[in-house]
Amino acid sequence: MGVTDRWIEIAEGLLVRRHAELDLSLGLVVGDGECLVVDTGGDAHRGAEFAAAVREVTPHPWRVVLTHSHFDHSFGTEAFGPCEVWAQRGCRAALVADGATQRARWAAHYREEGRPDVAERVERVNPVLPDRLVDARAELSVGGRRVDLLHLGPGHTGHDLVVHVPDASAVFAGDLVEQGAPPQFHDADPPGWPVALDALLSLGAAVVLPGHGDPVDRDLVREQRREIADVAALCAAVAAGELGVAEALARSPYPEEFTRPALARVTSGRTSPP
């Protein structure tokens, strides 16, 4: 494991594993005699590293929950099998429809970075399909601890699932929330995203665990919600012909490389994957 990979303990039996690769954050909920793993990393090797780190914390049998289908959150799942894999129903559909495309895209990315070993690992992934599917809500008991799996509507993708741990006043938000970098809009629903964040805030959790970056508080989520709403408004104005793309890019709270995909999502008439 990389020297910067480390655990952050949020509360008793609630931890986040911070990874240097992509500034990724993976989660763990430990109950009495079992645990829940939140996301699994970007390939079988990364997944195995994370599984080994989990075993440093607890020997308990695990279940896995995927916050969404993007490769860095879901391609490491085979290292945890066989076990239950929970996800929003659309996550499974997206892995079936887009898994091979993601594999090829990210393998090419790592080759361009001069990291052929990582590219080869990604190419070897056969994504594990979730077998416990959530529509809007599911309540789990993880060793006696209540954990709520909630689909709050389209946002970063069409199938984001948040993991709410009420006894710790914490929620794993996946990539609905980003810390340290702007949010990614390539598969997003810009007008739906602020609504999903309103629903996340209504849970009342004091600590929010982003899919990338360090744990944050509610104030950061509110600020990011405002920024994403600003982007959604710019998208609507461009789609309506009220604003040109160049002006929208200039007004955006985010750099052009992050804003252009949001504009493309709306102006092309595309919607989020299921």
Image: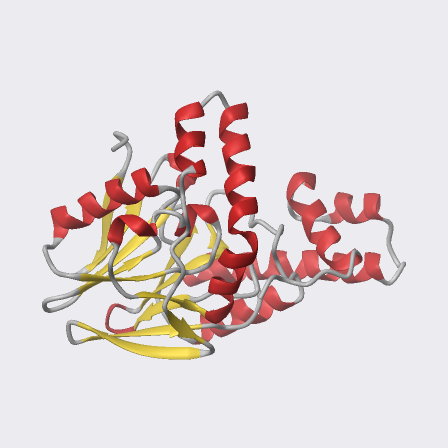
Residue 134 % position (x, y): 42, 74
Specify the quadrant of the image occupied by residue 204.
bottom left
Q: Is residue 11 above or below residue 200?
A: above
Image x and y of residue 39, in percent: 35, 54
Q: Is residue 250 left or right of residue 149?
A: right
178 left or right of 240?
A: left
**Residue beneath the point at 48% across and 60% down:** 221
In this image, 25 relative to 153: left or right?
left
As drawn, is 229 to the left or to the right of 90? right
Task: Using the image as rendered, state which of residue 219 and residue 106 is in the foreground.
Answer: 106
Question: If the image is split into quadrants, where does the C terminus sit?
Answer: bottom right
Q: Nearer the viewer, residue 36 or 61?
A: 61
Residue 196 rendering spot, x and y as whole percentages: 54, 69
Q: How is the image coloured?
A: secondary structure
Q: Residue at x 13, y 51 (%)?
A: 57
Q: Residue at x 72, y 60 (%)?
A: 270
* Picture quadrant of residue 23: top left
| Above/below status of 249 relative to 85 | above
Q: As drawn, which residue projects farthest toward the right?
A: 241
Residue 269: % across, % down: 77, 61
Number of numbered markers:
0
Q: Quadrant of the N terminus?
A: top left
Query: Front-most of 122 and 254?
Result: 122
